[in-house]
Image: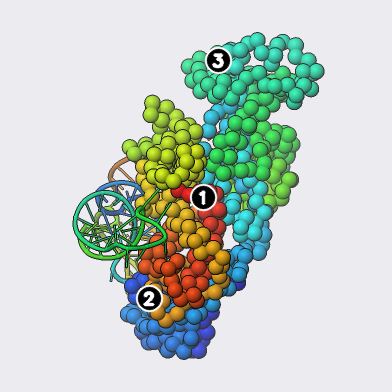
Amino acid sequence: MRKLVDELLLIIQSATVEAGYDKKFASVKSSDRPDLCEYQCNSAMKMAKELKKNPLDIAGDIANELKKRRELINVTVASPGFINFDIDSEFLADYLEKMNSDKNLAVSLDNRKPTIVMDYGGPNVAKALHIGHLRSAIIGEALKRIARFMGCRVIADVHLGDYGLQMGLIITELKRVKPDLEYFKPKLNNKYFELAETLEPQFTIEELGEIYPRAAAKSKEDKEYYEEALEATRLLQEGNSAYAVLFKHIIRVSVADLKKSYRRLNVSFDLWLGESDAKPYINDMIERMRRNGYAREDNEALVIDVAHPDDKKEIPPCIIQKSDGSSLYATTDLATIVQRKKDFNPSKIIYVVDKRQELHFTQVFRAAAKCKLIEDSTEMKFIGFGTICGSDGKPLKSRDGGVMTLKALLDETAATMAEKLENSEMSEEEKKEAAEIIAMAAIKYADLSNQPSKDYIYDSNKFTSYEGNTGPYILYSLVRIRSILAKCEGMDSSIFILNKEQQPKEKKLMLSITEFANAVETAYSEFSPNKLCAYIYDVANSFSGFYNDVKVICEDDTLKKQGYIALLQLTERVLKKALELLAVDIPKRM
RNA sequence: GCAUCUAUAGCUCAGUGGAUAGAGCGGCGGUUUCCGGAACCGAAGGUCGAAGGUUCGAAUCCUUUUAGAUGCGCCA
């Protein structure tokens, strides 16, 4: 079914033609001046320029035609050429009834049904998730759900950071701390290797968590240590069997822990592949790059030139092989593209990554296109997100000044939320559960309501507030709607009525609801969950206004009451769907 | 040095060529015999970093400039 604005556009178009003008100019949008009208048409000004005619005359001509239409009321013309109008109540009620019976709530799906690989999450193995991983997870998950709702086939890949020097560092440090582990015995036989799947790893996630930061620090100061890590990295990449077992165990321990953390955020992946899974594709890929003359030697390293003559900024060549022959970040990213092409043949690959990596991805995308790893029609999309900052405007740190782990952040916010829960009817257990759900909503909503590319300031007090444009406020509105509906049990209704003595707030809520499709489609096409948040807030606000002016339960007129119930049921459905797209859970009570 | 991004109300942010630049918070004033007042309503508060330009019309496009953040071939 069509969106309401599209229905209106058809009307404007036919009126434009009736008035003797070209319909290509026709346009309509919800009003920028709600005090004057509900919808506006700005096309007369555009036409005036081309036709060299007074815009007021054109607007008048079109307005005269619009006045004949039963769907529109209060059609007026305003200087310098705006056409303003309201929408007829009966028409609006009919539209809502249609929307209510549409399973997609008037959203028109992307009929190309693209296959999309989404790369988000990006955690490193053996390292606790920290604040930097929050946005990738939240934004990526929202974009995935929105794309799926729009009819896309989306494959979400967590793309673990499990390759390169970091692995060598972990191995080196583990060997220093626990030299007696089986992995480091000189003659590890194949039998042990076969047992890798069945044997328990000989270390815990907590141990791993301590190891990496220490190793990273040591390697910077101690040249010998650094060399050792390089050697371990090389051995691992060459397929040393003992290290291969160790590697498997590191992955197993890490992934189990990561899944737990992501589950708390309602974030899930279809694939738990990592950089290392692209390894089998590397040699062949590089060989082809050499053979076809795409890559060249430079200071003993292998590079691909990706600069364009008309580049404003200098794009350095993409290095795909170090002078010592080992591969690096760009190599695995390119090989991963080969892998994804083979496995899914996607029409789009989307990366949700820290915006500071933009140059790297520009290089990778260009190299992929140049070396024909993908077809020209495959869209490579980089969605760079900004940094989460503390109140000082600098990247958020933990209280002691170290890296803020994700768990610490979630725990702190959940604790803040628990303190604010006032509902005394709830048991302690129920309170705790609700606080967790609301806290996650608070964090996600705050993050998603900002533009992805911008930095934002993390203010736990503000985010967990029930007032203003916050997750808790949205949830509160929804829980209240449900509370009313629960009290009207057995009175389900799908009759939308908007009679003459309608309340202005009632119509406002109806108009807000009709914008759902627009909000979802915009969030999808612009990769902007923040547009969906803005919409949710608008609906919640409209509901609060309605709630204040219109008493549903004590309404005596049965017909009226049914109209209210239908409206609230649809409001509930719209809000629930929108929150589901953002991966925000709803508490039973709060 | 070169490049990219950001700059909008006291604070946090919307607003990618249209009317009087909008919200929330904070501060000020109001609204409760009634569905959860954790709400609603109202007024105050801005030379859209600065200066030019394009346009009937600019926070939005172009040029210059100031400040901050970020990035710039063998880390991931």
Residue A346 seen: yes
Instruction: Please tell me in which quadrant of the rendered image residue A555 appears.
Output: bottom left
Counting residues from the N terminus, which is met first, the one under dot 3 or under dot 2?
Answer: 2
How much space separates mark 1 and mark 2, taking CA atoms?
38 Å
Horizontal and vertical percent position of residue A5? 50, 73
Horizontal and vertical percent position of residue A531? 47, 57
Q: Secondary structure at mark 3?
A: helix
Dot 3: within a 10 Å radius of its alpha carbon, few (fewer than 14), some, or many (20 or more) residues? some
Q: Secondary structure at mark 1?
A: loop
Dot 1: within a 10 Å radius of its alpha carbon, few (fewer than 14), some, or many (20 or more) residues? few
Which of label 3 and label 1 is nearer to you? 1
Dot 2: chain letter: A
Left or right position of A500 against A178: left
The answer to whether A57 is drawn above or below residue A535 in the figure is below
Dot 2: within a 10 Å radius of its alpha carbon, few (fewer than 14), some, or many (20 or more) residues? some
How much space separates mark 3 and mark 1, taking CA atoms?
54 Å
Horizontal and vertical percent position of residue A124? 57, 32
Left or right position of A587 against A396: right
Q: Residue at x 58, y 13 (%)?
A: A177
Dot label at residue A225: 3
Residue most toward the right? Answer: A191
The answer to whether A78 is drawn above or below residue A183 in the figure is below
